[in-house]
Every structure is written in C-alpha cells, then in structure tokens.
Image: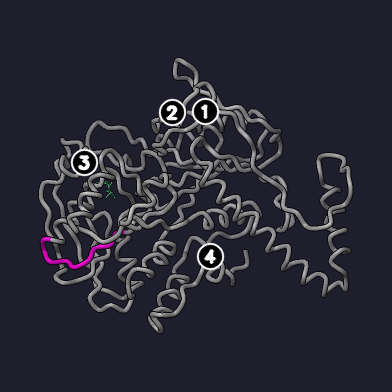
Amino acid sequence: MSIVKPHKLGIIAGPGSEYFTGKVVKHLRRLYLDRYEKLSAALEKRHDMTPEQLLDVVTLNDDLISKKIPRGRRPKIYTCPDFEIPVKYTRFANGEEKAEILQAVRGLRLFIIYDVTNQYPVQIAGSDEPVVLSINDHLMFLFTTVDALRIAGADGITLVLPAYPYARQHKKSGREALTAALFGRMCENMGVERIITLDIHSREIENCFSTTHLENLHASYQALIQLHKLIDFNDPNLVVVSPDTGAVQRNKFYAEALHRPLAMLYKERDYSIVSKDAKHSNIKSISLLGDVKDKTVLMADDMIGTGGTLLIAMRKLKELGAKKIICLVSLPFFNGSAREDFDQAYKEEVFFRIIGTNAVYHDQTFTDKEWFIQADVTELFARVISRLHHGRPLSPLLDNRQFIHRLIDNSQANPQAPLPGSKVAYSDRDD
Ligand code: R5P
C-alpha cells in the first residue's frame, strides 16, 4: 500500500469527540501532503519526470485500485482523501442508544476516536437539546458503533480511547469485579483489533487480552514542551515529587530525564470510604520522603479525578515549604467539584500551574483558566494511526526518550534556545 494515499482508512468520531478527532484528521492530512511533497520531489529527480507526469502516474494507480469507475477530469494537484465517516447517534426516550453508519465502510480499516469520559452536553438525534451522557452511556454508543461497523463489513476496527474506561478497577481486594479487564474482554469479543490509549493507569490491564492489541502512548514529551515554557530545566532547586507510591515510576522517568532528585509522598487510605472530592477523600495520613523546602516542585500523575490526590499532596508540600508547584497530568478529568476546588487552591497560592493534555475534552471556560495549560497530543495520535494503517513500526513513537533527551539537552545547553516546535521535533522521523 502506498504511503502517500490512505486507501481504506476511515476515521469516526464518537459523540463529543469531534474536536479532538478533527485535530487528529487535520494532522493526518498534513502528514500525507508532506509525504507526497517529499516523495514526489525524490521521484521526479530519480525518474526524470515533471510534477505533472508524476501526478498522472499516481492518479492512474489510484484509479486502477478505486472501487468506483473514475469520472471527471484528472486532478491538477495531489489531494488527500477525506477519511471521516459520518455516523448518526440516536438516544431514544427509554434511554436506549443506536449508532448508524452513514457511508459504506466495507473493506475499510476504521479508527473510532472516542473520549468516553466526556462530561459536557453533546448533540445527538432524539433530543432537541444537547445532553450530558454518563460514561456508561458513552460506552453503549461505542459498542453500538463497533457492532454497526462489523455488520457493515469493516475490515478492522481500532478504538482510539485516550482515556481507557474503568482503568482504576484493575485489581481487587475483596469480592469485586475486575472491570478494566471486563471492558477489555467485551471489546475483544466484539472483534476489536486494537485499542490505542494514553498513559493507562496500570500496564497489567494488557494481560486481559489474548487477540486484541493494546498500544499505550505517553504524553511526557508534549507535557515537557509546555513545562519548558514555565521553568528553567537548569534550576538547581527543582525537585520531582511522586504524589504516591503508584506514581513513582512515572515521576522517576521525569527525575531521570531532568537529572533532578526524586522525593515521594506516602499515603494511608481508608478504602471503606469513596472519595468524593478533596475535602471528603479516603486519604487518612500523608508524609514526605525527601526535601521540598524552598524548591520548585514538579509532580506527575496519570489523572486528576476528584482532585483529592493532588490537592492534598500540594497542600502538604506547601506546608513543608515548597516554593512553586507544577503538576503534569495526562488525563485531566476534573470530576465533581474539582474545578472549583482547584480555583480555590490557586487563589490560596497552593500551586502555580497544572499541565494537562487535550485527550480529555474541556470547553474554553476551562481551558482559559490562568492555572491550566493544555498540552496537545493530537499529532501523536495521528502519527500512530498513520503508522498502524501502513504497517510501519510504532516503537519510535512509543519510546519518546530520545526526543525528550534532545529537548532537555538543547535547553540545558542554552535555556533561551527556541523550543523545538512539533514539526521540527518530529522532522527527522520518517513517518
Ligand atoms: C491513583 O492511583 C491515581 O493514579 C490517581 O492519583 C488518582 O486516581 C487520582 O484521583 P483523584 O483525583 O480522584 O484523587
């Protein structure tokens, strides 16, 4: 399959995921256009052809494998196909849901991009007003979409779920369900080929699959690009703190990359209590292993749910003399009253900034907050989709350490050096 035309590729947005999907598609289209530019320049030279002659050959090849008899004039410029597949989502009065694929998909390899945690009102058929869907409502839309695609003859279905649902139910202590694995098996039973997600809460979840593949992407590079705009990576007073034992690996990664010490908070929880918010959390006691006095603290976690974990941690660090606190989170859910709780903590100067990715949808009233900085991961997802579709290795994108080292080394050599923009940063990758 040619790497310049995404034949047989289809992209679907779940309800409420249109914005993220739109950005991924935009990156994909740019990738194909860039590739065509590079390839055509090389081929014109190699085969002694004019751009027009080359385009004629490309068009002829396209026409030969097209499913329809081509009509109309030959294109004058290279165009990238539009691979978005429209879907009609309906919710009935009794709460049942339906997905209807509005275009033929037989033989296509489909990627469903869906933030199933979206908490904002979404417009769907069957309701005059936008409605807020629960995570379970979103999952039912996901399942009906997968089933509709399967029945319609899709050649392969990949779920792009930036937030893997029920990820925190990956282990049990009593008579509890293992819902993270249950969700995985449900997807597998429906014939899902692959799930692409971001910074999954626990790698153990991968063990539940036998035929479906799980690709876990990391937002660390994108988060560090934003962090570099806030602090000097050379600051000797910078310390990385893990908010709990579960986040040690994640924070060790940042501490090693930045060549800074790692400290850790140790918490005791009462699991008979369900955390509602920072004030009603199940955290019973908290203590620090390390030193944060007069330091700039960097603290990374996979997610902010109720915000209890980070708010309690930040208040403790502040109490212990931390000067400036910045948190990095891949999945900034901000459930319940978390937004107001962070507003309040910011007013009290408990922290400086929270860097979160756009993998979780938030409207502008949230993204405009002075204390919130958004890291864009859509290009990463676009590149992964393109590589998967063309059967190319993912490893250069899954292991981002060399790009992070380059980013940090450049800035340590010259803190004033301009940041590598995403185009520059990725430019030497052949994808
Ligand atoms: C815990 O194991 C996770 O990594 C997060 O720290 C936690 O789930 C965040 O949830 P919340 O914001 O509700 O404390």
Residue furthest to the top in view is 94
Determine which residue is flagged by label 1: 124
Residues under labels 4 and 2: Cα distance?
Answer: 40 Å
Viewer-side residue, 162 vs 332: 332
Q: Amino acid at mark 1?
A: Ile
Q: Is residue 426 left or right of residue 292?
A: right
Q: Secondary structure at mark 3?
A: loop
Q: Mark 1 or 3, which is nearer the eye?
A: 1
Viewer-side residue, 393 vs 112: 112
Determine which residue is flagged by label 4: 396
* Other-residue count near label 3 (Cα within 10 Å), few / some / many at <14 / 14–19 / ≥20: many
The image quadrant of residue 408 is bottom left
Mark number, residue 277: 3
Q: Mark 4 or 3, which is nearer the eye?
A: 3
Q: Name which of mark 1 and mark 3 comes first in the sequence.
A: 1
Q: Residue at x 68, y 63 (%)?
A: 34
Q: Amino acid at mark 2?
A: Val
Q: Name which of mark 4 and mark 3 comes first in the sequence.
A: 3
Determine which residue is flagged by label 2: 131
- Asked if one can make out residue 189 in the rendered structure from this viewpoint, the answer is yes
Q: Tell me where the magenta segment starts and ends, as one range.
A: 319-327
Q: Amino acid at mark 4?
A: Pro
Residue 289: x percent and y percent? 14, 64
Please tell me whether residue 256 belongs to the stretch shown in magenta. Answer: no
Quadrant the C terminus occupies: bottom right
* Other-residue count near label 1 (Cα within 10 Å), few / some / many at <14 / 14–19 / ≥20: some
Q: Name which of mark 2 and mark 3 comes first in the sequence.
A: 2
Q: Secondary structure at mark 4?
A: helix
